Structures are given as structure tokens and as C-alpha cells.
Image (spheres, rainbow, N blue to C red):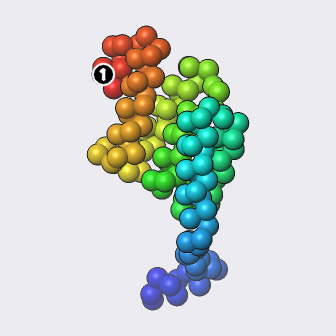
Amino acid sequence: MPAVAEKKVRGKKKQKKKKNDPRKLEVLDDCAALGHACNQVRDFDDARRYVKRAKEGYEEQLGHDNEKALEVSRSLIMVTCLSRGERLEKLRDLLKRCQRALGEENVVTLETLNTLSARLYENGEDEEAIIV
């Protein structure tokens, strides 16, 4: 008996793969770009708002472990006013997600690793920054 027929016998419905709307993705790309621009001019409230919207949209359209979703997740961590310890913890968690989902050599993984290392160095944790 084919696998599809078995699914019907067991009462499971075949799920259609959700198609991404290119227009929505274009808007999300623009939201991410606006968030980065706002961050550059130190408009942190708008930066946070745009980057958060981009992150939520990418996760909805592309999935939580997509490269774009993970990249804007790092941006969101950096633009939110968190304590240094909380920021480091979130960057470590994000780095693990990037390594698992994208691999060790992916650009987003390496940028996240670099960001974590720089924040550790700024925090005076030189030895751990060098190891990372």
C-alpha cells in the first residue's frame, strides 16, 4: 500500500506546502533594511519595531530556522535594550540555532559568532572571546 494511501487510512490529511508570497517577502526585506537604517541614526524605537516586524514575517513565511529569520533575530537582539548578560545569553542560543540549521560555515552563523565574540570582548571576557 503506498504511503499516501496509508495516511488516508490513518485519518491524516495531506498538508499542502505553503507558498511564499514574493510581495510579502519584499516588504519584509524593506522592513529589515529600515530597521538597520533607523539603528544607524540611533532611532532605536523604530529600529526595534521594524526589525521585530521583519523577524515575525520571515518566521511566518519562511520558517524559524531560515537564514533571513535568523539574521534578523540577531539584529533584534542587538537593538533591544537588554542587559549585557541577557544579550550574551540570547546570542549564545542564537549561535546554536544557526549552527544547527545553517551549518558552521554559513555567513549568518559566522556573523553571529563574530557578534558574540565582540560582545564578550567588550564585556571584559577576553579569554572566552578568543575561544569563541
Q: Is residue 97 visible?
A: yes
Question: Vertical placement of 29 versus 12: above or below?
Answer: above
State the image coordinates of residue 25 (x, y, percent, origin top left): 56, 64
Q: Quadrant of the C terminus?
A: top left
Q: Quadrant of the N terminus?
A: bottom left
Question: In the image, what residue type sits under mark 1?
Answer: Ile
Q: Residue at x 56, y 20 (%)?
A: 84
Question: Vertical placement of 71 versus 128: above or below?
Answer: below
Q: Residue at x 34, y 39 (%)?
A: 110
**Callout 1: few (<14), some (14-19), or many (20+) C-alpha neighbours within 10 Å?**
few
Q: Residue at x 43, y 28 (%)?
A: 116
State the image coordinates of residue 102 (x, y, percent, origin top left): 38, 51
Most extreme residue toward the top is 124
Residue that numbered label 1 is attached to:
131
Q: Is 54 left or right of 112, judged from the image as shown?
A: right
Element class at badge 1: helix
Q: Residue at x 62, y 32 (%)?
A: 42
State the image coordinates of residue 61 (x, y, percent, origin top left): 58, 64
Closer to us: 122 or 64: 122
Q: Quadrant of residue 60?
A: bottom right
Question: Vertical placement of 56 versus 15: above or below?
Answer: above
